[in-house]
Amino acid sequence: MKKLAISALGFVFVCLLTLPPALGQQPQDDELNVNGSTSSGSNIFTAPGVNAAGYNQTTGLGTLTVTVSGSSCSTCNVDLWLFTPVATPFQNEYGATTGSVSSGQSWQIDVPDNDPSGNRTGNIISNTDLNTLDNTNHVTGNTSNYLNDCGANTSGGTVDSTCNDLVSMAIGFTFGSPGSGNQEVLTFTASLTGCVSGSICLEDIHPPDGNNPNGGGILFFSATETSGPICTGPSCGPPPPTVPEPSTWLTLGTSLVGLFGFRKRFR
């Protein structure tokens, strides 16, 4: 009976290690900086200007938008950092980029600041908080780290910049005040299927290894920026209620009095 229980536990462990990409994306973490105010975890959902209805924090996938309106800041910034491993083992991934940055846009690919692997020391979270992303891919790979034995992980080893590692990604925007009646909308998208056009696209790649014979997949992270008048049309939701002018109140009052008199006369 004991041998059977041990075998069952071993089978469960193997199954967990071989989860497909969409299910194997743990641990997941994120951090948002809007004009110097940072939030993470569930606090992102209640940050000012954030619409996270299309963003799933469990998987780290979906679309998150941040709207900055009016003259709330003179020099504004929005930065989002994501740590969403594509597959297990988490440390056997590397980064890549496609496309180019737009004006005022910045990015960074790096290990998280508290990376336990020992190969690198990252500063991507602190740079997200300071709006100082360095436009550099610090985990270019591709030397397998499947057994977590690449570079400094080996006894007496040295740091090897070609080692795969943990990969996290961040994109930021810096822009002037939208001004009265205007807004800036930043849209961040994390997907397993491809990039959003019109933006630099950051990629977290899990290559084939002993746990993923066909490769673990790719996480695509991109972001776009749009600006214009504050949206109040039907596509933006109901417009704010208007206050009736004095003449409107007078007309409404006269109508009610007439209706009351008619009802009384009819009775």
Image (spheres, rainbow, N blue to C red):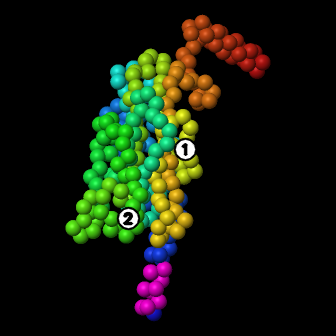
- Residue 43 visible to the viewer: no
Farthest left residue in view: 156
Quarter of the rendering occupied by the N terminus: bottom left
Is residue 4 found inside the magenta-colored segment of the image?
yes
Is residue 139 found inside the magenta-colored segment of the image?
no
The residue nearer to you, when weighing 142 against 170, is 142
The residue nearer to you, when weighing 55 against 146, is 146
Circle 2 sits in a helix, a strand or a loop, which is it? loop
Farthest bottom residue in view: 1
Q: Amino acid at mark 2?
A: Asn
Q: Residues within 10 Å of mark 1 (few under 14, many from 20)?
A: many
Q: Classify 84 as above or below 39.
A: below
Residue 19, image x and y in percent? 51, 67
Magenta residues?
A: 2-11
The residue labelled by disc 2 is 145
User: Which numbered dot is residue 183?
Assistant: none
Residue 126: which quarter of the image? top left
Q: Amino acid at mark 1?
A: Cys
Q: Name the residue located 33 percent from the left edge and 35 percent from the top edge.
A: 131
The residue labelled by disc 1 is 195
The residue nearer to you, when weighing 26 against 218, is 218
How many discs mark residues in the rendered view?
2
Q: Name the residue located 25 percent from the left edge and 65 percent from the top edge.
A: 157
Circle 1 sits in a helix, a strand or a loop, which is it? loop
Q: Classify 122 as above or below 246.
A: below
Q: Name the residue located 74 percent from the left edge and 15 percent from the top edge.
A: 262
The residue nearer to you, when weighing 121 against 244, is 121
